Each structure stands twice: as C-alpha cells, then as structure tokens.
Amino acid sequence: GAVVSQHPSWVICKSGTSVKIECRSLDFQATTMFWYRQFPKQSLMLMATSNEGSKATYEQGVEKDKFLINHASLTLSTLTVTSAHPEDSSFYICSAQGAAHSQETQYFGPGTRLLVL
Amino acid sequence: AQSVTQLDSQVPVFEEAPVELRCNYSSSVSVYLFWYVQYPNQGLQLLLKYLSGSTLVESINGFEAEFNKSQTSFHLRKPSVHISDTAEYFCAVSTNAGNNRKLIWGLGTSLAVNP
C-alpha cells in the first residue's frame, strides 16, 4: 500500500519550453502533496505544499509563477516548470500524505529527472 | 523551529559488519521521526518511523532505530549490513500538530558497503 507514481521519469527539453510532471497516489487519497527538488549529492529541498482543491503554499525563494502546482483531485497533483532554463535541470520528487493512510507519513514517488538544454 | 543533524556524511563499512547512522534533532515540541532510504537514481522509501509508543522501531530488512528523548536522538542501526544496503539515508522530523506536517530533513548519510 501507499504507492505514489510520477510521470515522466525522465524528460529532456529545450530552453524556453514548459514541462509538466504528474504525481499520483495509486492506492490512497492524498489530502496533501509535497513537491521537492534535489540537487546531486544533496538533501531534499521543499518547494511547495499543495492541498486538494486549494492553492499551493510555496516555500520562500520558490517562484510560484515559474513552478505552477495544481492539485485538482485527491489522487493527482501536477508541477509545471514554465519557460524552463538549464538552471532548472534537477531531480524533482513528489510525496503524498493521506488522512486514511497514516496522515503523519509522506510517501514518495520515484522522482523525475529534468534536463533542460 | 526544528532542525536535524546527521553527524556523518559518509559511512564506509565492510559487508556483514554492524553499522550505526547517527541522527540528532532539536525541537521545542513533540515530533515524529523518520528514516528514509534513497537508492541511486530513485525516489525515497520509508525505512521506519517513530510516532509514539515503543521507542525501538524496526524495519522489515533488519534496520532498527531507537528514539531517545533525553538525548534527542534517533540513530539507525543494523547488526550486519549487505552490499545491497548501499544507499543514501535521510533522517527527518515533523511536528505532531496540524494537518500539513512538513518534514525537516537532515543532509543525508551515504552508506557504502564494501565486500
């Protein structure tokens, strides 16, 4: 139980294009989803917290117009990197937290590696 | 505010040797404690967690961690490691209040198990 998927697992795009990453909770309803960014050999950096049906809460220093987050249902959240640039290249990881499935615990997706050329 | 310190950035160890990965935290309120493992090029997997009750928690693959409130520690141990345990290990804490329980992360410990 508590499986979270991400799609795509890998994406390469040209500078200036937008990229959408999906995060799905497969076997539970996720009232809260979190988006993280991880640089090589470093810990996770929380970007934003999203609750189903409401606007995401962004961490300080994260551009909300750059990283658009939508949490339209209890099983799906999307992160759109708009007008991507090479410095946006990174490993993006989502996690989900659900009231019915251990609301204290975040369950993580496998991550999406983004390379912007 | 909470903070997490993982005292060792890298821990090299030989196969079948015991290992301890150290984690200390600071918090003015009660916390939940977690260990996550990240294998190369993968997402994070929950290894074990302490929410309440018995201070010694175990995972299915032989790891255990003990919550020590007086020392504000949650060290991870395994009596005999395998090559397959080579991974990055992250300690994290969250408060036990509110609905959005953000995790505060340590910087990670890279466990390298050598034959």
Image (cartoon, coloured by chain):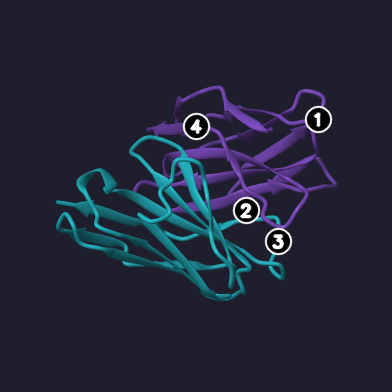
Q: Amino acid at mark 2?
A: Ile
Examine the rendered structure and indicate whether residue A19 appears above or below residue B97.
Answer: below
Give the numbered dot on residue B69.
1
Mark 2 sits on what residue?
B60
Question: In the rendered view, would you say B3 is above or below A73?
Answer: above
- Secondary-structure class at tag 2: loop
Label placed on residue A103: 3
Residue A15 rendering spot, x and y as whole percentages: 16, 54
Residue at 47% from the left image edge and 42% from the top image edge: A45
Residue at horizontal 20 percent and vertical 62 percent from the top: A17
Q: Amino acid at mark 4?
A: Leu
- Percent position (x, y) of residue B114? 38, 31
Label 1 element class:
loop
State the CA–CA distance, disc 4 to disc 3.
24 Å
Dots 2 and 1: beta carbons under 8 Å? Answer: no
* Colour applied to chain B: purple
Disc 4, SS: loop
Dot 2, crowdedness within 10 Å: few (<14), some or many (≥20)? Answer: few
Q: Which mark is residue A2?
A: none
Count neighbours of disc 3 (C-alpha within 10 A) and say few if under 14, some if 14 to 19, many if 20 or more: some
- Cα separation between marks 2 and 3: 21 Å
The residue under label 4 is B107
Q: Secondary structure at mark 3?
A: loop
Color used for chain A? cyan
